[in-house]
Image: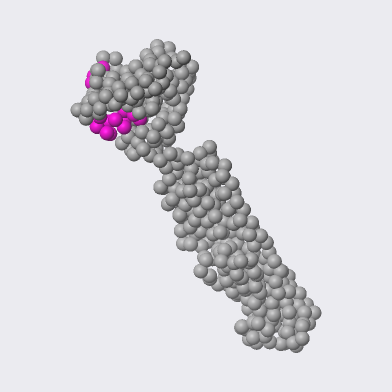
Amino acid sequence: MKRGAIEYCVLALVERRESYGLELVQTLSAVDGLVTSEGTIYPLLSRLRRDGAIESFWRESDSGPPRRYYRLTEQGRQSLRTFRSEWDRFKNAVDQLIGESP
Amino acid sequence: MTTRHIDRIAEDYLRRLDDELGVLPARQRREIMDEIRDHLAERRADIPAETEADLRDILDRLGDPREIADEARRRFGLPDATAGPLEIAVLLVMTAGAIVLPWLPAGMAIGVLLLWRSPCWTRRAKYVGGYLPLGAAIALTAANSLLDSGIGLSALGGLIAGLVLPLAGAVYLAVRLGRRLRPLAWACTAAVLLVVAVPAVVSLVPSRTSAFIARDAAPRPVTSGKTACGAFYAAKHFPGRGAIETNVGICWNGGRAWRTWGPNCPVSSTGLARLSVHRCTVRSQGSVLVIDTDITERATTTSAFGRSEGYGWVIAPDGTFRSI
């Protein structure tokens, strides 16, 4: 469940703002319990690039060599939209069934 | 210097990661390596006076190379890295081939072909355990058959190519598979090895054999005074693998046997045998002479297709000995 959701978390972050690898890693790690090891984000990024959900470009940085940035593609936008509605339904269904803890 | 030591730790990590990612297509591997290199560089640059502990902390948070590679494998839908029938086949074929054909790396060639298809070993492991040893074995075998030099050297070369390199490669690959090779697989491999190896070892033990002088082909037996000379075939039997025979020329003066060994020493199915007659006793049994010989095997230089080695003595039709 986590592995499927992280993909869309990354897409959502990139939708919010064009980011580079380390930025995404830092944001994701800051959320409790989402990522076990930072390095595992990079295979995900590579996969998303190959699938065409994100694309990369280089941008100069003032503190060192240029960085590889990521931005959402139209395809990525579309799949994120789909996931959002599915996630809503899923979340509500589970909440309903699980209910409040006694 | 501490800085260089720290750099070496970082390089080691990246090298291991590159190795583990070897199962991925080249483009994806490069992408991930580049990104992680940048990640590492940037994180390290943030620390003004970096210590080894700092670096190890960064690497810990990055994660174990194998973990990252496993994640990559999952993300790209590559098969899981637990050893399956293909991997067992690689190990078995290489080992069994080495034992059954100890002078020719045929089993190793097949094993390496299978190895190429397996996702369970990293690129480097495949090179060290498979491709390179096979290359060396083939080169050695080719050199062997071309040069055909002295007895000891060529036989040693054949053994290294056909036995030592495949076994070493198989052991290395098995160790690298390590925890991914389930205990059951280990047990199966060990069982098959036992079944193949034990008869192979047993059959190498020299054995006695006997032969009848009446069975000789040529030269014909002649008698000179009290001495009878003739040739006979001595054979050594290998359990389940047939026999090798050799021509033995011998003269018997009614009490003492001159021993020789024959000019024709066909090579056995193992490619390793040359028979030497060390000791023989002669007795008459009715109208025939029976020679009991003690025959042992020695390594040979000839190829598997048989070639005569000319040495020893020949008994000419007129009954004289002639050395070759």
Residue located 40% across and 40% down the image: B79
The spot of residue B19 in percent (x, y) is: 42, 35
Q: Is residue B156 magenta?
A: no
The spot of residue B162 in percent (x, y) is: 53, 55
The spot of residue A69 in percent (x, y) is: 26, 22
Q: Nearer the viewer, residue B289 or B42?
A: B42
Q: Is residue B111 above or below residue A60?
A: below
Residue located 44% across and 25% down the image: B63
The spot of residue B120 in percent (x, y) is: 45, 41
Q: Is residue B19 above or below residue A88?
A: below
User: Does residue B8 appear in this view?
Assistant: no
The quadrant of the picture occupied by the C terminus of chain B is bottom right
Q: Nearer the viewer, residue B220 or A55?
A: A55
Residue at the top extreme?
Answer: B48
Does residue A49 appear to the left or right of B306 in the view shown? left
Residue located 38% across and 39% down the image: B78
Q: Nearer the viewer, residue B91 or A27?
A: A27
Task: Give the magenta range.
Answer: A42-61
Q: Is residue B170 above or below residue A75?
A: below
